[in-house]
Image: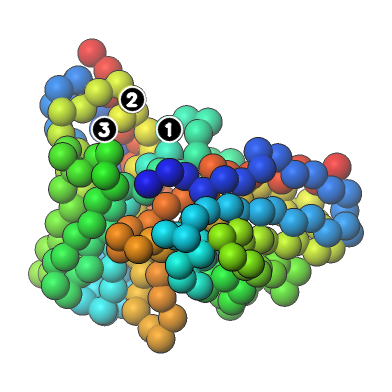
Amino acid sequence: QVQLVQSGPEVKEPGTSVKVSCKTSGYTFSNSAVQWVRQARGQGLEWIGWIGVARGNTNYAQRLQERVTITRDMSTSTSYMELSSLRSEDTAMYYCAAEIYTTSCCYFDYWAQGTLVTVSS
Amino acid sequence: QSALTQPASVSGSPGQSITISCTGTSSDVGAYNYVSWYQQHPGKAPKLVIYEVSNRPSGVPNRFSGSKSGNTASLTISGLQADDEADYYCTSYTTTSSYVFGTGTKVTVL
C-alpha cells in the first residue's frame, strides 16, 4: 500500500536551516509529484511548493521561494524540503503529500503524518 | 497568491445539508477544473474528499459533493453526521503552476 513517512520533530535556533525528509513506498515514485504544506498551530494550511519527481522540476510559494528548496532522491524514493534562515514564524507542522499521476490532475491523495518544526532560541 | 476565501465556520444538525463556499479568481478557481477539498480532523493530516471539482475518491461517501461556478467552488455535505465535524480546506491549481489553499472552514455538527 502507498505510504509516506516523514522524519522526526526538529528544534532549531533562529537563522539556521532545517531539512525534513519524506520517504515514500508502495507506488512508482517517478510517476508522481510531491507537495509540501505547513500549518502553524491553530492556523490554516499553507502551500510551500512541489516537485515533479521524474524531471525534478519545482515550483515554490512566492513568499518562501528565496528560503525553500525541495529535492528528491530517486534511489531511495524520498523527497526533502529544506528551509533556511529560520524565524519564529516558521514554527509549524510540515506535511508532504503525493500525487500519483493518472488521467486526473492536480490533487494530493496520500499524506504523511507530519513533522513538527519548532524555531526557538 | 492570496488564499482562497472560505467562511470561517458552518454548522448544521445531524441529517441536514451544509454547503461551504470557496472563492478565488480567474487565475485559480476560475481558470481550471482543478479544485480539490480536504477534510482535517484535529491532530490529523488532511484527507482528500473531492478532486477535480466534483469527483470523489474511492471510500469517500456520496454524501460529499462538489461543484463550481465561475470563480467560486462549493462543497456540500448532505445527511450530516457527527464524524463530519472537522476543518475543511479547498485548494486550486493556478495559472502559475502553483497551488493555493483556502482559509479553511470549521464544520460543527450541532
- Residues beneath discs 1 and 3 located on the same chain: yes
In the image, residue B54 sits, relative to residue A71, either above or below, namely below
Q: Sequence order check: which comes first, mark 2 or mark 3?
A: 3
Q: Which residue position is annotated with label 1?
A: A40
Q: Quadrant of residue A40?
A: top left
Q: Which residue position is annotated with label 2?
A: A89
How many residues crowd around disc 1 within 10 Å: few (fewer than 14), some, or many (20 or more)?
Answer: some
Name the residue type under label 2. Answer: Glu
Observer-nearest of A13 and A43: A43
In the image, residue A71 sits, relative to residue B8, either above or below, namely below
Q: Sequence order check: which comes first, mark 1 or mark 2?
A: 1
Measure how far apart labels 1 and 2 are at the Cα level.
8 Å
The quadrant the N terminus of chain A occupies is bottom left
Secondary structure of residue under mark 1: loop
Q: Which residue position is annotated with label 3?
A: A10
Secondary structure of residue under mark 2: helix
- Residues beneath discs 1 and 2 located on the same chain: yes
Measure how far apart labels 2 and 3 are at the Cα level.
15 Å
Mark in front: 1 vs 3: 1
Numbered-mark total: 3
Judging from the image, mark 1 belongs to the subunit labelled A
How many residues crowd around disc 3 within 10 Å: few (fewer than 14), some, or many (20 or more)?
Answer: some
Residues tagged 1 and 2 counted as in contact (Cβ below 8 A): yes
Image position of B51 (left or right of B84): left
